[in-house]
Image: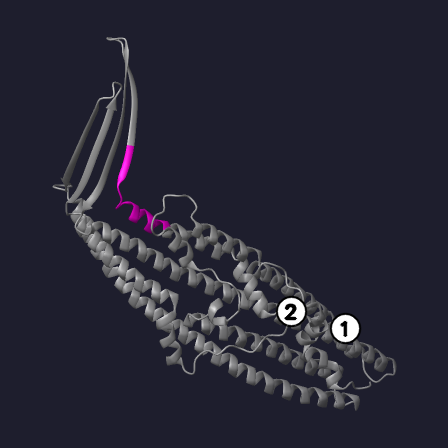
Amino acid sequence: MVAMPIKRIFGIGLKAGAVLIAVSGSVQAESLADALTSAYRNSGLIAQNRALLRAADEGVAQSVASLRPVVDYTASTNYSSLSDSLASSFGISASMLLYDFGGSTIRTDLAKENVLSLRESLIGIEQDVMLRAVAAYVAVQRDISFVALSENNQRVITQELRAARDRFDLGEITRTDVSSAQARLAATKGNLALAKGNLASSREEYRAAIGSYPGSLAGLPKLPATANSLEAARSVARLHHPDMLQAQRGVVIADLNVAAAAAAMKPSIRGNANLSLDQDGEDTHSLGVTLSGPIYRGGLLASSYRSAAAQRDASRAVLHLTRLSIDQNVGNAWSRLAVADAQLQARDQEIQAASVAFEGVREEASLGARTTLDVLDAEQELLDARSSRVSADSDRYVAVYTLLETMGLLTVDHLRLGIATYDPAAYYNAVKTAPTYKVSPQGKKLDSVLKALGKK
């Protein structure tokens, strides 16, 4: 049997994904930045939470509106059978909150804090979308490499089987060696089918995460910078992670709820005015000021205050737990990255040793000192080493982006994708003063921005 050079046997498998990408690179390969951009623009989850944020923006407008005059009209016509006549009247009434000991101000502040909290939640959703897109992109790259490795392995074992049959015909080996090669070829075909199935699943995940099936993919770019140490990563996470910022907002909201519960026990002063006209044109009008407040509510107000105080204590505990959780997540991500780095180095050493072993076994087999099964085993060990190396490289890549996510930095702005991003303040600024018209110039401008984002 003529020994094939190792570089020829496994040269394609070593850079399987890169070869496939290079071949199709002329067809405008999609980069990771392109994929992340598509994920950001096509995410239904992000769109849903943007709408929820705009609904919260309207909460501020509604709170502001409650401080303005309320004007109503009434018009009535009544028929009297006694006088066999119609009586008509028309009236306008107006009222306005004059003073409520800070309750209205507290409610407005609550609405604003809810908006800020949901903005942090939207950033968290954005991070989840970005990480899922990175994982999907890397998974397709990885599975393309696995398919190429399996296809190349099948070609090599087919050649091994052909050579084994030739040697059997010459009486150099037994039927057992031929059968071993046949069994290994059948197993390789099964592994290739599995690799193609995994690639198909990865393509479906890619479509779900990014919005379209992958075409030709560019090679993975240089990894982004993270942090120099675990403590530095944790410090960044405590300052920037949206979960931490949202938990801090939750404490402020809880404090405001306590203040609102206390304000509910106080009176309020409202001004009112009424004007009415009867069918004869006679008018009556009145002006007045009303002071009202609770006297007895069956313990409801006191219970509401105690409940708000308990929720405040709980929110402070949540803030503490959130910090612990963020520290843990950063530590886990840092550990996974360190493990991935170590595995990558180990796989490189494994490939080097397995290559030398495979070459030696093939040489010994050509001299009759090794069996065909020995060659196939050595070949499989080299293939496993190369496959493990592809997995380790993919794991390391995803681990870096996972660390960025735990630090709160996996956003479109931090990744510098160079695309127009959604400005959560645009809609807020358009409605925060509670305009009485349906569509303001600012609203029209915002609609055009949203449509432009959707088309890109």
**Most distant residue in the right direction:** 170
Q: Quadrant of the C terminus?
A: bottom right
- Say how the picture is coloured: one colour
Residue 126 left/right relative to 345:
left
Circles 2 and 1: CB distance less than 8 Å? no
Secondary structure of the residue carrying numbered label 2: loop
Image location (x, y in percent) of residue 105: 23, 52
Reply yes or no: does residue 61 show up in magenta. yes
Q: In this orientation, does residue 123 appear?
A: yes
Image location (x, y in percent) of residue 168: 84, 80
The range drawn in magenta is: 58-72
The residue where tag 1 is placed is 182
Q: Quadrant of residue 346?
A: bottom right
Q: Residue at x 14, y 47 (%)?
A: 266
Count of labels shown? Answer: 2
Q: Residue at x 35, y 59 (%)?
A: 117
Q: Quadrant of the N terminus?
A: bottom right
Q: Can you tell which of label 2 and label 1 is closer to the viewer?
A: 2
Earlier in the chain: of badge 2 and badge 1, it is 1
Image location (x, y in percent) of residue 27: 71, 68
Residue at mark 2 to residue at mark 1: CA–CA distance? 35 Å
Q: Amino acid at mark 1?
A: Gln
Q: Mark number for residue 217?
A: 2
Q: Amino acid at mark 2?
A: Leu
Q: Residues within 10 Å of mark 1 (few under 14, many from 20)?
A: some
**Most distant residue in the front direction:** 281
Q: Quadrant of residue 243?
A: bottom left
Residue 118 left/right relative to 137:
left
Q: Mark number for residue 146?
A: none
* Viewer-proximal residue among 376 and 116: 116
